[in-house]
Every structure is written in C-alpha cells, then in structure tokens.
Image: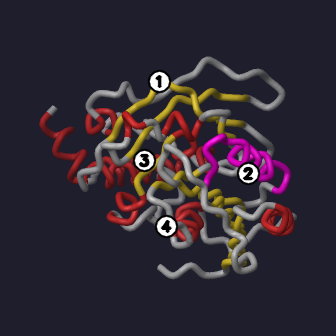
Amino acid sequence: MPCSNFIPHPAGADTIFVAPFPAYDVVIPCHNRAHVVADAVASVLAQVHAATRIIVVDDGSTDDSAAVIRALAAQHPNVHAVILPRNVGASQARNSGLACASAEWVAFLDSDDVWLPGAAEALLAPAHLAHDIVVGHFSRLEQGGEPEEPECGWDGHDIRAALATGGVVGPSWSIARRSAVERVGGFDPSFHNCNDWDFYTRAAAAGARFVRTEATVALYRTVAGHRLVADHAVGATNAARVLAHPYLAALLEAA
C-alpha cells in the first residue's frame, strides 16, 4: 500500500539516530482525540532511544485532531502527519501509517494511551531481538485516578494457548518487527473491534516469534470519547471470527 495523504517535511529534515538499539517507527491512529493525541506523541518524543518517525494518522476526525496533528508535525522533525479524508477505522488507519514506516521495528500506540519513560529501550532490549513481537506490561489509568497495578494478559509461555482465551496482547504495550506485520497484511479493516486480537493471531499463525518483557511500558487510559471495546454485540461476533481461525480452532477442537 503506498503512503498517501502524507505531509512531508522539507528535504533533509529527518534525523538519523545512532544508538545501540535498532531503529523503530511509531504509528498513532487518531479519531476525535484532539484532547489527548499530543500526550501520546509527547510520550514517544520523551524516549531516550528516539523513534525514527512518529507517524500520526488522523482518521477522518470531526474535532480538531487534524489541526493538532499538523501542528505537532510542524514543531517536531520526526513527527509526520497523515490526514485521511474520511473515517476508515482503526485497522486501516494503522495500515496507512504502516505504509509510511521504514524502520526495522514498528509500534502501534493508541492515541489515548501513553508510553512510559524507557519503554523503547525495554521493548527493544538486545535479549528480545531474536523475536518478532515483544510484549510488555501496562497499567490501567481511569480518568482522574492513579495508575493501577501493572498487568499483561499473556504469561509469556504458549502464545497460541493464550490467544485462544482472548485478546491478550495490545498494540500500545508491544512492538513488532515490520516484516512480520507486513507478512500478514497488517490489520484487517473488516474488524470493527477485536482487530488487535485478530492481528496477533494471524501473526502467530504465520510463525511470528513472541517474547514478553517484565517491564511496564504503557498507561492504558480511559478518556472521554467512544471506545471500540464498548461495542459488545459487534465484539462478540468478531471474537467468534477470531476463534474460527484455523490456528486457534484446531487447538480448541483438540481441547
């Protein structure tokens, strides 16, 4: 998929970072999150091991998100704005950002979540680089509250068995080798929700190697605005679709 609706910086604006960690890009899809998207971007900009590109995709927002994103791109050389003309959903927005990525590794941070200091170094630690998807811990942060105890839906053992129980991996607290994402065509736009669960299931089925780090790398925030996880009826239908994937169905049938 070509990188379209991409607002480039002037020639030579990109900075190449030399570090003992591999290069990575971060894709941040955004729909009507003008009030928080700058927090997500700031949390990536604050990483000691800087992202090569922070690709912020406005998914046809009806609020001021596009203006906020353009302003961030104008202010920071490694922040790049992709403005979509209409709402296409989180999966396609992520794919649009992926098409603009060039680093070996890519993370997908939701616009209402934030990375914690040291997240990039924890996820890209040398011990993890023989794998394709690195999964960290996260803390829930309810609006107006304090971060809860860190958690991770996957115990770090059999990823197939874990995925057969639900969506145990989230994009905001993981990072993937870009080739592993592209191998399965990225995220499936036909999923209104459960798209993360579907993606990690297809990646695992295609042979992606998963590893867990004990580091807490993100805050999963509850902010004002609609969340896809609240669509329970559609979620039940999509969950059944994920569980019907042969990679999981065969395991469940044998149980």
Magenta span contains residue 67: no
Q: Residue at x 50, y 49 (%)?
A: 235
Image-based side of 255 in relation to 184, left or right: left
Q: Residue at x 75, y 79 (%)?
A: 10
Q: Residue at x 70, y 80 (%)?
A: 11
Residue 27 appears at what percent x and percent y?
Answer: 60, 58
Task: Decide: few, some or many residues near mark 4? Use Cα within 10 Å; few <14, some 14-19, many ≥20.
Answer: some
Q: Could you tell me the amino acid type at mark 3? A: Trp
Which residue position is annotated with label 3? 197
Q: Could you tell me the amino acid type at mark 2? A: Val
Q: Could you tell me the amino acid type at mark 4? A: Pro
Q: Nearer the viewer, mark 3 or mark 1?
A: 1
Give, as a single range, the part of the protein colored magenta.
Answer: 34-51
Which residue position is annotated with label 2? 41
Residue 29 appears at what percent x and percent y?
Answer: 64, 60
Q: Secondary structure at mark 1?
A: strand
Which numbered disc, 3 or 1, marks the residue that appears first in the sequence? 3
Q: Please name whichever residue, 54 or 64, is drawn nearer the observer in this view of the structure.
A: 54
Magenta span contains residue 37: yes
Mark seen at residue 214? 1
